[in-house]
Image: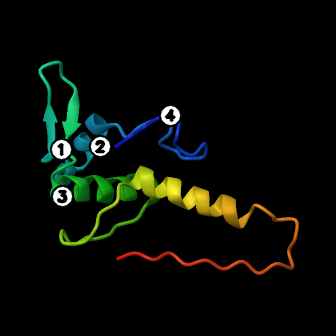
Amino acid sequence: MAHNKSMHPRNRYKDKPPDFAYLSSKYPEFKQYITVSLAGKPSLNFKDPGAVRALTCTLLKEDFGLTIDIPLERLIPTVPLRLNYIHWVEDLINYHDSDKTVLRRGIDIGK
């Protein structure tokens, strides 16, 4: 999960990435996917769909109060990147906010 200057300025994860140590201490279902390096740094295998799903569900619960179930056979986007997308769409919608007579429509095509 990339955390860098290309993240949207309003993204809550831009300057504060998820704290895997804290989250694993609070959510046992997430903890099972955390490994700790010899230096004591917790990490997550982003190639493991179960780990990505656990992270997504944990962040949605912790930061947004949402409880969801995502089947493993579905695409599981990471919350910080999806939040970037939402902020960019908000920016596009609000770009000409002064002209309230313009009806804006959009479509998000995905599977």
Residue 61 shows which numbered tag?
A: none
Give whichever of discs 2 and 4 has the lower sequence position: 4
Query: What residue did someone put label 2 on?
Result: 23
Left or right: 30 as drawn, with respect to 107: left
Residue at 85 percent across and 74 percent down: it is 100
Q: Secondary structure at mark 1?
A: loop
Crowding near the residue tagged with mark 1, few <14, some 14–19, many ≥20 C-alpha atoms within 10 Å: few
Left or right: 15 as drawn, with respect to 26: right
Query: What residue did someone put label 1 on?
Result: 45
* Residue 55, image x, y percentages: 28, 52
Q: Secondary structure at mark 3?
A: helix
Query: What residue did someone put label 3 on?
Result: 49
Residue 15 shows which numbered tag?
A: 4
Residue at 49 percent across and 55 percent down: it is 83
Callout 3, which amino acid? Pro
Indicate which label's residue lies in the foreground, 2 or 4: 4
